[in-house]
Image (cartoon, grey):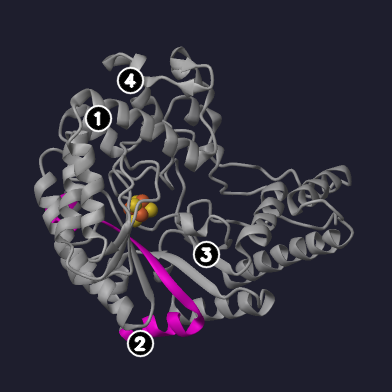
Amino acid sequence: MTMLEPFEICSIRPPTENFSLTFRLTRNCGWNRCLFCPVYKQGMKFSRRKMDEIMKDVDRAKAIDDLIMQAMVDATGRDIFQVAGDLVRQIQRYGGKADQPPLETSPEEDANGSGNGFSSWFKDKPTIEDSVQHVAAWRYYGRNTCFLGDSNSLVLKPDFFREALSYIRHVFPELNRFTIYGRTKSAAQMTLDDLRIFRDAGLDRIHFGLESGCDEVLAFMKKGVTGKEHIAGCRKTIEAGISCGVYVMPGLGGAEWAEEHAHDTARVISASSPDYVRLRTLEIFPGTLLADAARKGTFVEAPEDMVVWEIRTLVEEIDTDTEIVSDSASNLLDVSGRLPGDRSKMLSVIDQYLGLSPRGKLEFSLSSRLQSFVGQYGGVTQEILRTIMPFIDGDRIDLGRASYTEANKVIQLIRSKLMP
Ligand code: SF4
């Protein structure tokens, strides 16, 4: 037990991979220039990991898993997290390798707001506690899924990816779904045969950060890709037999390009025909280049109604068979469903909101953001609790008592606490 060691996990992963077993094939982001993006900053450098490092991590995960499963045999009535907790305490007591340096980011970065709380959960160098909890959560909730990070695993040589996956599957034969993040540009630049090697190695899905289909927006945001390349990358991925999911960011065009952003994104999605479109409304995170642009006035945030109108345009104009997913607390409305069949149901959710009075919209926004926050993070922060305290009436929150300014203050506070 004292020989157990932590392995590197992917803190940044799609919500569908929250409970997957994860391994880092690369570290951080090789592009790292997108204005809106708060992750992999604070001096984090991109690097490719060596095969023996990856294999060592897989072996470390297996050693932890074996010990947890062994302990579970005698753990009558105790769940896997209690068993994992005991294990961590024993490792600490016997002087195992529990005290790895926990983070590369400093507390000051969070204190001054540049990290937005980010460093409290981004684990660049996980401890043995993190690794044990990660494996326990995978065993409890995930069991057969695996995510391979970090931000763009398509930068790897196909043979390298195949070798890594083959080793992971050999050590964990129960894994039967593998997913990665990728850049559409990388997929567009690869040959179909290379993408098929990724597919044949076991890759099931690529999550692409499409963000926008509008070239002006993509250029302003320094996304390093065009709408045409988005389409080429998605199409080639699908042709290779790999499922394709895209993230889209309502609000990314700001007030200036809202219309172009909405129409062009709908057009690019229609031509790309991804299996999933996940909505992530723009949040301007502190410390990003976009926060600087907003401060200088070169980027003006789109008002909430304009962002809702953009989503309406997407739902109305996307002309392909795809699933729209709203699984982020950044979204005001829960607009989810399968197009084209659920189009009218989704439009009615939007129109119901747009038909509210200004006061009705404000109260809806406050209540919806509060609920989504609790849903995504399992509760509110002390600061949010203090701010809503005056409106708590017994066991309910009476938002009708909040003035326009107070309600807006809570909304802004909740939005500032969202994680990327
Ligand atoms: S959005 Fe993706 S590609 Fe852009 S900097 Fe962030 S991680 Fe890298």
Q: Residue at x 53, y 44 (%)?
A: 122
Callout 3 touching callout 2 (CB < 8 Å): no
Question: Which residue position is annotated with label 2?
Answer: 193
Relative height, residue 190 to residue 80 (above, below): below
Sequence-first disc among 3 and 1: 3
Tag 4: residue type? Ala
Residue 88: x and y in percent read 79, 47
- Observer-side mark, 3 or 1, equals 1
Residue 124: x and y in percent read 56, 49
C-alpha span from label 1 to label 2: 51 Å
Q: Image quadrant for the N terminus?
A: bottom right
Question: Which residue position is annotated with label 3?
Answer: 147
Label 3: few (<14), some (14–19) or many (≥20) C-alpha neighbours in 10 Å? many
Secondary element at image label 4: helix
**In the drawing, does residue 224 fall left or right of residue 125?**
left
Report the span colored magenta: 192-217
Sequence-first disc among 4 and 3: 3
Is 387 one of the magenta-colored residues?
A: no
Tag 1: residue type? Lys
Sequence-first disc among 1 and 2: 2
* Disc on res. 407: 4
Tag 2: residue type? Asp
* Disc on res. 361: 1
Q: In front: 48, or 320?
A: 320
